[in-house]
Amino acid sequence: MRGTTTGPNDLNITVRNALSQLIDPFRLEYTVYDYTTNVEVLMGSPVNIPVKMSTGQYYAQVMIPADSNVGDWRLRWTIQETAADPVYQSVQEFNVVGSNVITSVTGDPNLDKLLHTLRIILRDNNPDRNYSVDGGEKVTIRIGTKILSATMKKLWKLYKDGGLKEGFEVRSVTKDCKIEWRKVTDVTRHDVSRKSQYKVSLDNYKSCRATGDHSLFSLDKGMLKDIKTADFISGSDLVFVTDNNVGTQKILSNRKLILPTKYMYDLSVESNENFILDSGILAHNSFRPPSKERFIQGQTQVFGFIWEDEELLEYLYLAVDDLNSRPPVTGIIINDLWGGAQKWRTAVIMRAAAFACFAIAMNWIADEFSIGKDEKLTVKVGDVNEEETLPIEELFTIIYGEKMIAYQDLARQGIDEVRHGKFIAFCKKFMRQIKLWPNSPKNILRKRLQGAFERGQLYIKSYVQETKAVAWKPIKDVLKHNAEHKKIMNVLTTKRNGDIVSLIVTEDHSLFNWNTMEPIKTSDIERNFKLIGLNNDNFDAYDVRTIQPVPYQDPVYDLSVPGTENFFTTSGLLAHNTYSISGVSLDIEKSSKYQSMKDEYIAEYDKLVEAAKRSVKIVKGLRMQKFGTGIMSALGPLSRPGVQSRRSMIESSRPVWI
């Protein structure tokens, strides 16, 4: 039943050997699937360990959420008697029961239904759940006895146009690394122009392009383990399929693409939730949520947390207030949206969803704590002891935008040349600069730093709290933010030797308190505070002389240093990891995605409200007392054309209009 946890008498299993003796097998695991739609949807972790009651006696302890789907579910047991024995699977079906009304949160079943509906809408339109692969990636499909190869883009067109009505299959891999054909239940296309996109290249010259949140696979103790594309680093092992063998291949580079593709494509593959690309790379089922996203709540997460019911209820109240402020629509009560005011229900839910998305967009922006563009960083490439010192803005430009900016400058020059009739001269100049540009000192530095960054070997000094020591740590990302809505502060400090050190930061950026060794927001720092700094690789206390706001209109920049979540600037001050909370990248890209989502909801809401207002006006007009007799429509009364008045201005002998 919904809201309960299964016990020893529910989903149990008895394991015996060939002699019918009770045994404890070498391997016993289970996986839970929602089968209410006749498609196995993975629920929770793909590998779960059962509870042992006694020798050979086990049961699956499954928590059934209060808002789970009612109907048939499946439990797949994976059994291996000894390490040398083959792996077997056994399917156990069970039925989840419960009322269609989820457990009351507000005390009003109708309000709880509204919350549930709002949550589903936010889940289904969440831009962060569309994990996709490039349209040029090829995949082999089987239609009956025919085996064909097609790009993801072509496959989507065929599916959309009804050319694959009979259904088709793709090659897929089970959790224990067996290859099999599995049915594809859906092919979709997503606009991913606002998402980070990566190209993963292997040392066998194979590659794959995907969104950063799409999952590829590694192997963990012989079992598949899904990992987001953005989290792979050079040298990692990636699951690779050759013929009928599942193995691994080393990653040569994982490069974030400068110019993103507008559309990428998804497959939904039943059961295994993955498919094999023609390149040999195994891609996660891209249309389903990843295994860590459990049920509806898990698919509407922000910073790893879910929208609380109290938050969603507040958005619903705000939506009703907004609707009541638009005459002639007034007097709507939220409790009546499943009753007499149900015609307004969809509009209210759409407006509430817009409020929710707006709140997220503002949260992303509010949490961009960053440092000024001219602050210098000292970085190291790989194990080489050569260090490079450069402004953080230049580091960002080198890694992500140098080549693009150079070509844009040439293009702008070209427009001026062409306008003055010097097209041939421009073409010669363009080709000459293109040939020379790769050999420039700046480009050599760019290649060196960008290559190290893609390999995960671009390091910066960081403070390791566990060991109380300084160590070189890899930089995961460098981002740029617009912080016009924030105060920019100049923190002026002095070292013990009298040297003056300053740092330009946003008001919510954290430095480190010398006395507590903990981060402290810039806005909370006062004069004579002592901050953690570095002086010739030795810790030093930097005395705060002044801290004051400064005029600043340029972008600010961020680093992400996983693990330690901090880094030292070249000036020596220790700065908190600037844009990562629990591993979530906080950048304008995410804010804009939810802003777009909010705009879509608002547009739909406005359409609904305008249509509803017209209906209200028409209904009110029809209910008004008629002037004279016979007014029925713009086409005239049933018995006569035009309008009849009390003065009988139309002769009664006039023919009847039909």
Image (spheres, helix red, strand yellow):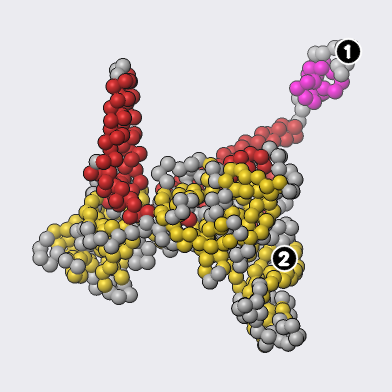
Residue 292 at x, y = what percent?
56, 64
Q: Let me know if residue 112 appears in the view.
A: no
Residue 546 at x, y = what percent?
18, 58
Whole-number angstrom distance, CA of label 1 to CA of label 2: 71 Å
Residue 469 at x, y = what percent?
26, 72
Residue linked to disc 2: 73
Residue 615 at x, y = what percent?
69, 36
| Corner quadrant of residue 528 | bottom left
| Corner quadrant of residue 461 | bottom left
Locate the N terminus and report the quarter of the image it occupies: bottom right
Where 293 falls versus 621 (above or below)? below
Q: Nearer the viewer, mark 1 or mark 2?
A: 2
Element class at badge 2: strand
Where 320 falls versus 311 (above or below)? above
Q: What segment carries the magenta color?
A: 628-648
Is 558 within the magenta?
no
